[in-house]
């Protein structure tokens, strides 16, 4: 990264304008997270949300990518989840329907049509999800005996669903506005801002843990007593060290790539010759980035949402209860209620399915964004070839083998990173009998690191373009 160049580019009015527009959009997004849904007493529903988040992993995932919008019962409650689900559906249909696959390969025009269909699908999905969550939350307030005198009318339902759907569509629009600025993917940046916005709460809870000296006493180090909780200090220190190690590994995995040398055939035209040069084709180890983890979490969490709807309608329904218990991620918050007798075989179901989905989505999404046949055709048209490999189909086959090998290791690495919370929970369960709730969030951490690096690269590229004339004059 050329950080000096990035700071230098901020003197350019166009670059500064783009950065300020993005910051303004992110500030507006955080303000939206504070606007409550117009549905009765917001405090009552916040209590219902708190109960719901202990039961459903989809709720925790939704709260994560909406920047606390669910916990605060704001109009961006459903967040970008409908858009993510819509993207999954459209991309699956693109692979299943040849006509759509042709359209996706039809350059910018085809991609625009597919993006438009994704936006159109987002609206009904947002409506369905809004209705489901309002219904679940209202039923939760009743079943949990939360005091409320509010009985929603048809008008209240319509107003709330419209507000939440509009909030989801506005987030999607904001993401596209950020993308248009050319210095990062807007949807990823909003999710990044959502996760970062939750960090002060985490730091505050860690700080209060350190300040609590009554439970385990003060820290005694080399005969000197410090005014911090001794046990909490070592836990937090271990957590920070593990965090640094994981971030380092994530950066290395994200930056790892296979370099393939591309040769251009020498052509003679009159008295001039062209080509005869070499270039490179970098193939990333994890070309799909963080998308497989987001897709897997959203996909796997939907059964828990369906189960929650069923149990809201009929609290004694066994199918609904089973869906919630099986497809809720095991964590410190639900361990005591779901596993009162200790670890059972069911505890391993969610992590195992999650790993398989991350692995499968890595292969699936890489095949979408890295079309080996298209790349081979483009190389052949440009008179380029890989040494020792015939142009055309042979080049596509060779690239396919390289990508598959990289995907195997990349998918395993991505799956293991996503497993970090469950691995650390399992270690603590084996050691002390229960999880401590300080697990490193593999999903959140992976999103933050990946998006931060991608955005830095985008900013760096634009900064180099802007300051190119300065470099030219200096040379």
Image (spheres, helix red, strand yellow):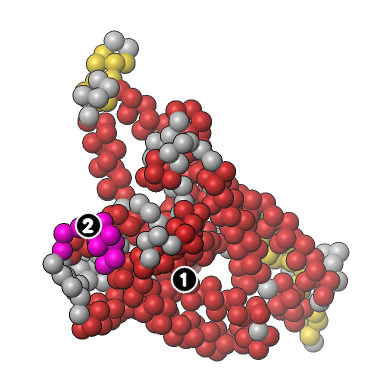
The x, y position of residue 405, in whole percent, is 73, 56
Residue 181, quarter of picture: bottom left
Label 1 or label 2, whichever lies nearer to me, is: 2
Q: Is residue 300 left or right of residue 231?
A: right
Q: Which residue is mark 2?
A: 145
Residue at 20% x, 58% y is: 146
Q: Which residue is mark 1?
A: 84
Q: Residue furthest top?
A: 223
Residue count near mark 1 (Cα–Cα under 10 Å), binned few <14, some 14–19, many ≥20: some
Number of the label disc, if any, that sits on residue 125: none
Camera-side residue: 398 or 132? 132
Residue at 39% x, 40% y is: 336
The x, y position of residue 270, in whole percent, is 79, 87
257 versus 433 height, above or below? below
Q: Is residue 141 magenta?
A: yes
198 versus 343 height, above or below? below
The x, y position of residue 349, in whole percent, is 57, 50
Q: Is residue 32 left or right of residue 281?
A: left
**Which contiguous range is marked in magenta?**
138-148
- The residues bearing labels 1 and 2 have C-alpha atoms spaced at a distance of 34 Å
Residue 471 seen in render: no
The x, y position of residue 281, in whole percent, is 68, 65
Asked if disc 1 and disc 2 are in contact, CB closer than 8 Å, the reply is no
Q: Secondary structure at mark 2?
A: loop
Q: Secondary structure at mark 1?
A: helix
Residue at 22% x, 30% y is: 211
Disc with the residue nearer the chain's start (1 vs 2): 1
83 versus 200 height, above or below? below
Q: Is residue 38 left or right of residue 436?
A: left
Camera-side residue: 62 or 46? 46
Residue count near mark 2 (Cα–Cα under 10 Å), binned few <14, some 14–19, many ≥20: few
Q: Is residue 432 magenta?
A: no
């Amino acid at each position: 990264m050329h950080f000096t160049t990035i700071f230098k580019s901020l003197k350019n009015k166009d670059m500064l304008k783009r950065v300020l527009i993005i910051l303004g959009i992110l500030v507006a997004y955080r303000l939206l997270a504070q606007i409550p849904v117009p549905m009765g007493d917001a405090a009552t529903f916040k209590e219902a949300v708190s109960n719901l988040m202990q039961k459903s992993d989809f709720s925790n995932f939704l709260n994560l990518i909406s920047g606390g919008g669910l916990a605060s019962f704001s109009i961006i409650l459903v967040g970008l989840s409908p858009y993510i689900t819509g993207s999954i559906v459209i991309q699956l249909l693109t692979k299943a329907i040849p006509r759509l696959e042709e359209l996706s390969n039809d350059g910018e025009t085809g991609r625009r049509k597919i993006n438009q269909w994704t936006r159109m699908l987002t609206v009904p999905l947002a409506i369905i999800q809004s209705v489901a969550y309002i219904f679940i939350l209202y039923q939760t307030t009743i079943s949990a005996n939360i005091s409320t005198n509010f009985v929603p009318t048809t008008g209240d339902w319509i107003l709330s669903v419209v507000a939440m759907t509009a909030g989801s569509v506005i987030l999607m629009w904001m993401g596209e506005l950020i993308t248009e600025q050319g210095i990062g993917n807007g949807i990823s940046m909003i999710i990044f801002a959502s996760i970062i916005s939750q960090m002060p709460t985490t730091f505050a809870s860690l700080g209060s843990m350190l300040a609590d000296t009554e439970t385990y006493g003060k820290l005694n180090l080399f005969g000197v007593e410090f005014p911090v909780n001794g046990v909490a200090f070592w836990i937090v220190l271990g957590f920070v060290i593990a965090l640094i190690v994981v971030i380092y590994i994530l950066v290395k995995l994200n930056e790892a790539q296979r370099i393939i040398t591309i040769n251009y055939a020498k052509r003679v035209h009159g008295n001039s010759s062209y080509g005869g040069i070499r270039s490179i084709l970098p193939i990333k180890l994890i070309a799909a980035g963080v998308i497989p983890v987001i897709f897997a979490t959203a996909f796997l969490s939907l059964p828990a949402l369906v189960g929650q709807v069923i149990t809201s309608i009929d609290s004694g329904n066994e199918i609904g209860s089973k869906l919630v218990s099986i497809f809720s991620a095991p964590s410190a918050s639900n361990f005591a209620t779901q596993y009162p007798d200790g670890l059972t075989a069911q505890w391993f179901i969610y992590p195992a399915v999650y790993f398989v989905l991350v692995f499968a989505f890595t292969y699936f999404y890489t095949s979408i964004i890295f079309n080996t046949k298209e790349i081979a055709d483009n190389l052949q048209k440009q008179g380029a070839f890989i040494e020792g490999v015939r142009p055309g189909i042979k080049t596509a086959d060779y690239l396919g083998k390289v990508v598959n090998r990289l995907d195997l290791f990349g998918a395993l690495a991505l799956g293991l990173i996503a497993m970090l919370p469950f691995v650390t929970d399992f270690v603590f369960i084996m050691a002390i009998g229960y999880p401590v709730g300080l697990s490193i969030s593999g999903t959140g951490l992976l999103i933050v690191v990946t998006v931060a690096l991608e955005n830095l690269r985008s900013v760096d590229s634009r900064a180099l373009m802007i300051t190119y004339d300065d470099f030219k004059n200096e040379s």
